[in-house]
């Protein structure tokens, strides 16, 4: 059993969803962590949930990125600890500089809440090891500022480093403009750090980890990080 920490900011609203999946669906130890806490040494994995941290004032994720806990999250990640940011959590990771690029207003200028398909581009991260490259997952989105943007030169480097983890696609895995819910450049739905231990994604895997919710593809992401943690523990014990 591993210990997960779910960070709670003023305005977080997917913290309980994430806790439920980790604790009751995956059977792991889980704890809420207030954003002013700076001690993360007791955790094996950190989750930054979706929501509207600080009411999305100023710029989505900008204020939360300055919370005391984020410096500890950065140190946790620099030591190789796995960090998952979903939706607002992705926005916070970008604003804090743990992931590159920026998330801007949806191209439709409207809040989007619906199921989407995403294609696995990189299955060698801490959160995708149990998935197959090219596999298509059906996961919901709910955001108003989820359009990922990066300059063309920077995007090329991102792709060369295999940091694009998920792309929006149709049910057969084809990238189309119709399957892109927010206008993200390159249909990008999620990216990771160079080391692959920090993942940011706009879709909500915690909202589809049980079939009763209409789909359970999100569970595969949590299963992957638990397997990753187990492999790391086994490797250390063999050293």
Image (tube, rainbow, N blue to C red):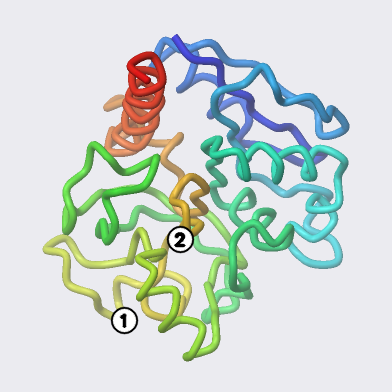
In percent of width and height, residue 56 lies at 78, 58
User: Residue at 84% of width from left, 27% of height from top?
Assistant: 37
Pointer 1 residue:
177
* Residue count near mark 2 (Cα–Cα under 10 Å), binned few <14, some 14–19, many ≥20: many
Residue 148, placed above or below residue 1:
below
User: Residue at 17% of width from left, 48% of height from top?
Assistant: 132
Residue 157 or 203: which is nearer the viewer? 157
Residue 11, placed above or below residue 212:
below
User: Residue at 46% of width from left, 81% of height from top?
Assistant: 155
SS under mark 2? strand
Image quadrant where one finds the C terminus = top left
Q: Residue 106 carries which label?
A: none
Q: Residue 191 carries which label?
A: 2
Residue 169 or 28: which is nearer the viewer? 28
User: Residue at 62% of width from left, 75% of height from top?
Assistant: 105
Q: How far apart are marks 2 and 1 (CA)?
A: 19 Å
In percent of width and height, residue 156 lies at 41, 83
In percent of width and height, residue 24 lies at 45, 11
Residue 32, placed above or below residue 57:
above
Residue 116: which quarter of the image?
bottom left
SS under mark 1? loop
* Residue count near mark 1 (Cα–Cα under 10 Å), binned few <14, some 14–19, many ≥20: some
Image quadrant where one finds the N terminus = top left
Earlier in the chain: of badge 2 and badge 1, it is: 1
């Amino acid at each position: 059993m591993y210990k997960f920490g779910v960070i709670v900011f003023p305005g977080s609203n997917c913290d309980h969803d994430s806790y439920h999946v980790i604790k009751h669906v995956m059977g792991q130890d889980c704890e809420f962590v207030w954003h002013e806490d700076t001690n993360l040494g007791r955790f094996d994995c950190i989750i930054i949930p979706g929501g509207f941290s600080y009411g999305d004032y100023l710029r989505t994720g900008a204020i939360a990125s300055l919370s005391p806990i984020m410096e500890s999250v950065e140190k946790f990640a620099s030591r190789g600890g796995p960090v998952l940011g979903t939706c607002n959590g992705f926005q916070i990771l970008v604003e804090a500089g743990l992931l590159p690029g920026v998330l801007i207003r949806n191209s439709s200028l409207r809040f989007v809440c619906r199921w989407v398909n995403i294609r696995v581009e990189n299955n060698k991260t801490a959160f995708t090891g149990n998935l197959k490259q090219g596999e298509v997952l059906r996961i919901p989105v709910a955001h108003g500022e989820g359009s990922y943007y990066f300059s063309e030169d920077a995007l090329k480097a991102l792709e060369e480093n295999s940091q694009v983890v998920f792309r929006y696609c149709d049910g057969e895995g084809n990238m189309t403009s119709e399957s892109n819910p927010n206008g993200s450049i390159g249909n990008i739905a999620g990216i990771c750090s160079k080391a692959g231990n920090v993942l940011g994604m706009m879709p909500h895997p915690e909202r589809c980890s049980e079939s009763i919710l209409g789909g359970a593809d999100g569970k595969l992401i949590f299963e992957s990080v638990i397997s990753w943690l187990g492999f790391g523990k086994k490797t250390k014990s063999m050293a």
